[in-house]
Image (cartoon, rainbow, N blue to C red):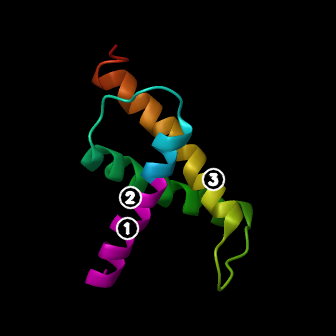
Amino acid sequence: MTIESILGAIVIGAVVGALGRLFLPGRQPIGWILTIVVGIVAALIGTAIAQVLGVDTTPGIDWIELVMQVVLAVIGVGIVAGIRGGTRV
């Protein structure tokens, strides 16, 4: 594992986590660091699922894999938000 791959995982996790928060309706009482962690985990699991399902890796953006990652991020942000205190009004 190189520093470039670690930084790449953080950037991709931040994007996937932010998209997960964006698509989840309502306010989520979790911070940005936790959002990035959820995004990193969702990205890793989404990539693993895509590989198991045989989704091809392309030189550009793998849209099917990205959709899987964002859906997992939405689920992950929802779970973490529920555990961290539900909804605040």
**Residue at the image position 44 percent from the left and 50 percent from the top:** 18
Q: Which residue is mark 3?
A: 68
Q: Residue at x 43, y 50 (%)?
A: 17
Labels 3 and 2: the sequence-earlier one: 2
Q: Nearer the viewer, mark 3 or mark 2?
A: 2
Q: Position of residue 74 (x, y in %)?
A: 52, 40
Distance from disc 1 to disc 3, alpha carbons, whole Å, reads: 17 Å
State which region is magenta: 1-16
Residue lying furthest front in this view? Answer: 89
x, y percentage for residue 44?
A: 47, 60
The residue where tag 2 is placed is 14
Q: Is residue 18 above or below residue 54?
A: above
Depth order, front residue of 43/48: 43
**Is 14 one of the magenta-colored residues?**
yes
User: Residue 75 lies in magenta, yes or no?
Assistant: no
Displayed quadrant of residue 82? top left
Q: Which residue is mark 1?
A: 11
Name the amino acid, label 3.
Met
Mark 3 Cα within 10 Å, few/some/many (few <14, many 20+)? some
Q: Are marks 1 and 3 in contact (CB under 8 Å)?
A: no
Element type where label 1 sits in the image: helix
